Image (cartoon, rainbow, N blue to C red):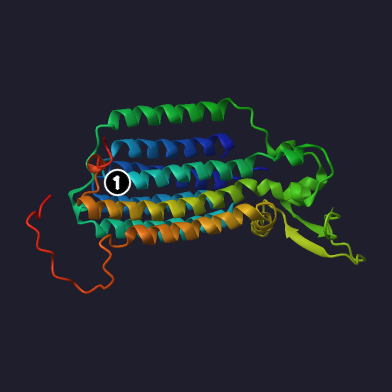
Amino acid sequence: MTIESVLLVSGALFAIGAYGAFSRRNLVTVIMSLELMFNGVVIALVAFSRFTPSAALLSGDPVTAEAIRSALTGQAFAIFVTAVAAGEAALAFALVFAMYRASESVEITDASEMKN
Amino acid sequence: MEVSTLTTIAFWAASAMTLGLAVIVVTQRDVFRAAIALAGSFLGVGIIYFVLSAEFVGVVQILVYVGAISVLMAFAVMFIQDIAAGSRPAQGRVVGAVVAVLIFSAIAFTAYNTNWSTMDEITDPVAVAALTESFFEVGTGDEIEIFLEAPLDSDDVVVESGGVFVNGTGSLGVLLVREYMLAFEIIGLLLVAALIGGLLMMRDPSGRKSRTPEPEPETGDTSV
């Protein structure tokens, strides 16, 4: 397990999500694909936090507590991204329900009311 | 930072589970089965976080994704009767496949052609010991010093932290409320905004206050 292999898995998950977002017509499955892409990004963040040192630790200056904790910056970002993704999922489903109530359909090809 | 064989096996097993179930999510026509596969895929990602020694992120992943978002998906599938018809593929299938292959090859190329700096480049013995074992912070305010062993004759405040690679949860908490305090607060605000926005959008647009069924308004055009 090196950073290359973890990034490979992260990229594969992102690519699968991208394919799903393009190829499905049902809005719910499109949102599922977006969540897969979110997860791919977060895996990359955690991998960078695990395998690469922060600049503060390589500078050669005397070690401070901030420099040591900066090794966990990727994990902090992972938590922020997860929180944003959770809010985004809730709002997306509210939109899907609103669309279903308005047009009795959840297919993206029917979501053309705002055209023209 | 040596990685044991067992860790590597666990990583590849979790990756296979994640990617396999993700493929099922994007190819399965039955939306409910796709939602179940998605929950399994999220669980695999959580295992990957544990393998990468990011325990707290792994627990958050399982609580938020496997626990909350998957249930939200299942509710969405059950609410929308139309979904029983299945998720038909759209015309963008070929475009999607091409885009996915391009993204994946770009990421793989970058991952294998970049000279990543490794943890072995940290030469400072204090830093290495503090990262992998534990360290003590002595003092307050701007005058904090790092020690590897607890100073016995100190009158200052002494705080012990686990090495961030073996027991990082405490240090992650400190990081969240010190360096990223503002971002942490804004995330809370964002979640409240999402909550209120979701409630507003879910409200019945006709503005009826009660849940009691009212007689249907008699209009001629029932189907639009």
Whether residue A65 is visible: yes
Q: Is residue B174 above or below residue B104?
A: below
Question: Callout 1 environment at 10 Å: few (<14), some (14 to 19), or many (20+)?
Answer: many
Query: Which picture quadrant has residue B222?
Result: bottom left
Q: In which quadrant will I find the N terminus of chain B?
A: top right
- Residue B106, given in percent of the width and then of the height, sits at 48, 27
Q: Which of A116 and B81 lies nearest the eye of the viewer?
A: A116
Residue name at image x 23 percent, y 39 percent: A109
- Is A13 positioned to the left or the right of A50 in the image? left
Residue name at image x 75 percent, y 41 percent: A56
Image label count: 1
Q: Which of A114 and B91 lies nearest the eye of the viewer?
A: A114
Chain identifier of the residue bearing label 1 in the image:
A
Which residue is the site of mark 1?
Answer: A27
- Is B186 positioned to the left or the right of A36 in the image? right
Q: Which of A78 and B198 lies nearest the eye of the viewer?
A: B198
Q: Which of B5 and A47 lies nearest the eye of the viewer?
A: A47
Seen from this angle, which residue lies furthest left?
B220
Q: Is residue A67 above or below residue A2?
A: below
Label 1, secondary structure: give it: helix
At label 1, which amino acid type do we have? Leu
- Residue A54, given in percent of the width and then of the height, sits at 70, 40
